[in-house]
Amino acid sequence: MALFTLFGILGIFQDAMLWLDILKWLILIWLAYYYYNWSREHLPFSPLLSLIVGAILIFYLVIEHPWVGAIGYFGWALISSTLLLLVPSLFRLFTLKK
Amino acid sequence: MLPFESLFSALSLPSLFSALPLLGILQTVSDLGLVIKIMVFAYLLYWLFIVFREQQMLLGLATIIAAYFMFFHQLSVIVLVLLFFVFIVMSGHFQFIIDMGIVPILGFLGFRESHGAMEEQVKMEEIQKKLMEGVTLSPEETDAFRKSQEKQTRYEERARQVLSSSGYSGHR
């Protein structure tokens, strides 16, 4: 019985790793799509060129250096979104007085 | 063979001071350099395509010229494109983020805009109040008061000069 319980607890961790693995693959696939889409948007006059540039970007930024690609993407999302404007508002929420 | 022999050999002095990690970093930097060059060239082609959309001939010529610049003046082109991107394409957005995001955060952290003129005015009002009440001023306060008066006189003199030279005589 105790052994079954132990395996049950280990199973949770295994499941967690499985989900993290799935999340990692989803992020990598999204990154690949994002960089291919970037090349498609910036080289709309030549499908062949956009394919080549997209392949180079995916090779270097997703396959070879996924951390660089991920930091580049999330950094760009942080800068180009309005998330940074929200930070002082969140500060203000905690410094409100009656 | 001892059980941990391979471990010891892995941690030996030469392998600790190996250049391999450095080579890896250099390889990464070189890879990213290629990626940056390709992205900058793609940006150039994108802008050329927008400008010469209707003139295929000019688009071709401009592409050749852009490729020439990209081959022989890479660094200058990359710096120029980055400057253009930061100061012209993204400038409004960055200004907005700085004014509405970063400056308020700095304000919460204690870095606030100084209002020098306003603070000086408040100080002068306090000094005048003391004078009215007949309180003796300290030497620093006397000095500050004198400087403020001189500044005021200079300002009025300058204003009078400007107004008289431009033929403006003021509102009655």
Image (spheres, coloured by chain):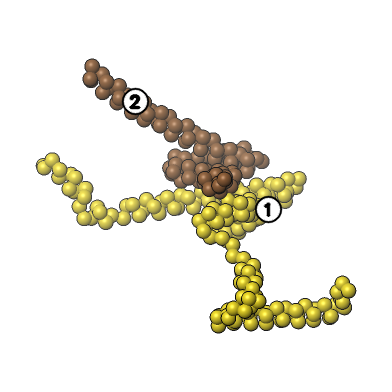
Chain colours: A brown, B yellow
Q: Disc 1 sits on a residue from what chain?
A: B
Coordinates of residue B147 in the picture (x, y in percent): 63, 81
Q: Which residue corresponds to mark 2? A: A12
Which residue corresponds to the image point at 50% horizontal and 56% vertical from the top-left? B109
Q: Quadrant of the C terminus of chain B?
A: bottom right
Quarter that holds the N terminus of chain B = top left
Seen in the image, is B157 located left or right of residue A71? right
Could you tell me if residue B4 is visible in this image? yes
Outermost residue, left direction?
B1
Placement of B101 over or under B151, stated as above or below: above
Question: What whole-number distance in Å separates the C-alpha atoms at marks 2 and 1?
Answer: 60 Å
Q: Residue at x 40, y 54 (%)?
A: B26
Q: Where residue B40 sits in the image (x, y, percent)?
A: 58, 51
Rendered location of residue B165, percent (x, y): 84, 80
The residue lying at 53 percent from left, 54 percent from top is: B108
Tell me the number on the disc at residue B62. Answer: 1
A51 horizontally vs B16: left or right: right
Residue B149, quarter of picture: bottom right
